[in-house]
Amino acid sequence: MSASGPVIAHEPSTRPTTRAMLVVLGWITRRPRVLVWIHVGAFEALSGQRERGRMVGERSFVRHVGRAERLRRMLRAGRRPRGWYVVHVFTRAELVDGLRLTTPS
């Protein structure tokens, strides 16, 4: 089975199993795997949750923040999670004007 075009998922992907599932999907469909990591600090993330009225439990949030921080340190050190061809790291401030995803023609 193969398909063209990117697979795009809006997912925090702090869990290694989630990232692995996305890698497998890309591998099965023969699509390149590009991870776009948008770093948002814990305070900003919690504020965004409150604004949207979509709160997660405190324990879940603390675990998510810990996983996100470990992954952010890894990415900033120039290491990629297994299975990803390219990784782009941004902050929310860098994307204030949005993010445009393009694919080669």
Image (cartoon, grey):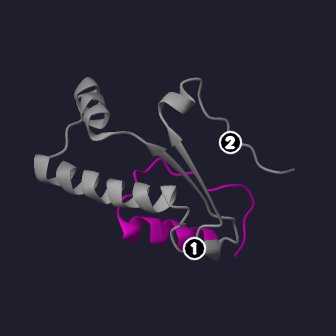
The residue tagged 2 is 101
- Point out the image quarter for the N terminus: bottom right
In which quadrant of the rendered view does residue 94 lie? top right
Instruction: Answer left or right for 61 relative to 21.
Output: left
Question: Is residue 8 rendered magenta in the image?
Answer: yes
Left or right: where 53 falls relative to 7: left
The answer to whether any part of residue 13 appears in the image is no
Q: Residue at x 48, y 43 (%)?
A: 38
- Residue at mark 1: 83
Residue 95 covered by magenta stretch: no
Tell me whether circle 1 and circle 2 mark residues in contact (CB < 8 Å).
no
Name which of mark 1 and mark 2 comes first in the sequence. 1
Report whether 17 appears left or right of 105. Answer: left
Q: Which residues are magenta?
A: 1-26
**Three-letter amino acid code at the position of disc 2:** Leu
Answer yes or no: is residue 12 visible.
yes
Residue at (35% x, 64% y) in the render = 15
Q: Is residue 61 above or below residue 67?
A: above
Work out whether residue 46 or residue 105 is closer to the camera in this orientation and state it.
Answer: 46
Q: How many C-alpha atoms fall within 10 Å of the one at disc 1: few (<14), some, or many (≥20)?
A: some
Disc 1 residue type? Answer: Gly
User: Residue 40, position in %: x, y?
Assistant: 38, 39
Q: Which mark is residue 92?
A: none
Judging depth in this view, the residue of 82 and 3 nearest the camera is: 82
Q: Secondary structure at mark 1?
A: loop
For the residues labelled 1 and 2, the Cα–Cα distance comes to: 20 Å
> Residue 48: where, in percent of width, then height?
30, 30
Pick the residue in front: 79 or 105.
79
Secondary structure of the residue carrying numbered label 2? loop
In the displayed structure image, the side of residue 52 where residue 8 appears, left or right: right
